[in-house]
Each structure stands twice: as C-alpha cells, then as structure tokens.
Image (spheres, rainbow, N blue to C red):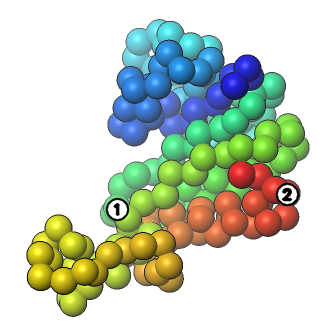
C-alpha cells in the first residue's frame, strides 16, 4: 500500500502491539487520545475519536484505517462507551467515506458475544469433551456495556460495507 495507514488508539495496548509487529510494513499515521509520553516514530495526531474535527486531519490522504480507539474497560460507564466506542466508530467510518478511504479494520471483541460463553456454552478451552466453537454465526450477546459497543461497532461496519462498499 502506497498511502499511509491511520491507526486510531495508537497509545493503547493493542495499538502498541500492532505497531510493534507491523511498524516496518506500512507508512503509519497515528492517532492518540492524548499527547504520547515519548515522541512516536511516525506522524501523529491527538484528539477525541468521536470528534470529526480531530479525526479528519489524521484521515486525510490515507489508504486504510485500523480503528482500535475506544474505552476498553469491560466496566466502562455508559457515557464513555457511547462517546468513545459507538460515536467514535461511527465518526471513523463516516469520515472514511468522506475522505475516499475504502478499507477500515475494526477490532471487535469476544465481549460482543461473550455471554454466549456461559453455562453449557463455555469456551472450548474449558471443554475438552465436545466440538463447541464460536464460529461467527452467533447473534450478538454482549456480556457488558463494552460488549454492547463492540457488537454495535460490527453493525456500523456492516452498514458502511453494504451502503458504501467499505471493506
């Protein structure tokens, strides 16, 4: 890919892991919620992912987005989940359309279907006696508010794929 790749949530645990593993593979453009403690090796922006005015400058001219920004706490309060995770994901997809970006990677979570892993539907790692697997055909069954936001993010992604052909 010749164009830069925008990584939202660059300061988070998963964002740092992505950069550690793929730093040399792409021309990254990073977005942080707040000023990073150390100067990043790539161009970066700071701001609120739900604020189009903060995200648009970071999005301009990129070829793809890896969207990891959000409040990752399973116990996150609803106002934070709405603003950071749901509104933030909508903002990223909406600006991708406006800026002509046709590839968005959205990181979901087992929390989107995590309540499917209860009782007799315990994850396979704990069930050596049968063939049960979560295979992507499950209905959303979030186990917490964070899971609600991830299930909603998947639906937002589906909408933008079906409506605007974002892959």
User: Quadrant location of residue 17?
Assistant: top left
Crowd rating for badge 2 (residues with CA inside 10 Å; few <14, some 14–19, many 20+): some
Point out residue 54 in the picture as x, y percentages from the top left corner. Answer: 71, 33
Q: Nearer the viewer, residue 88 or 22?
A: 22
Point out residue 34 in the picture as x, y percentages from the top left corner. Answer: 51, 28
Q: Is residue 127 visible?
A: yes
How far apart in space, not on screen, are marks 2 and 1 (Cα)?
Answer: 31 Å
The image's mark for residue 164 is 2
Point out residue 29 in the picture as x, y percentages from the top left corner. Answer: 63, 22
Q: Quadrant of the N terminus?
A: top right
Q: Secondary structure at mark 2?
A: helix
Crowd rating for badge 1 (residues with CA inside 10 Å; few <14, some 14–19, many 20+): some
In terms of sequence position, does the residue under pointer 2 or pointer 1 come before the other? 1
- At a point 56% along the width and 13% down the height, the residue shown is 42
Q: Nearer the viewer, residue 166 or 11?
A: 166
The image's mark for residue 74 is 1
**Left or right of 89: which side holds 125?**
left
Q: Secondary structure at mark 1?
A: loop
């Amino acid at each position: 890919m010749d164009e830069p790749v925008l990584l939202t949530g660059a300061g988070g645990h998963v964002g740092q892991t992505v950069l550690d593993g793929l730093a040399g593979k792409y021309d990254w453009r990073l977005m942080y919620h707040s000023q990073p403690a150390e100067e990043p090796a790539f161009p970066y922006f700071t701001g609120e992912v739900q604020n189009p005015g903060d995200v648009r400058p970071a999005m301009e001219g990129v070829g793809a987005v890896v969207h990891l920004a959000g409040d990752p706490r399973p116990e996150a309060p609803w106002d934070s989940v709405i603003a950071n995770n749901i509104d933030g994901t909508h903002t990223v997809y909406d600006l991708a359309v406006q800026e002509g970006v046709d590839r968005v990677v959205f990181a979901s979570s087992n929390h989107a279907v995590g309540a499917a892993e209860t009782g007799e539907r315990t994850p396979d790692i704990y069930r050596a006696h049968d063939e049960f697997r979560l295979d992507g055909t499950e209905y959303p069954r979030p186990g917490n508010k964070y899971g609600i936001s991830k299930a909603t993010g998947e639906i937002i992604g589906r909408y933008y794929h079906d409506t605007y052909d974002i892959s």
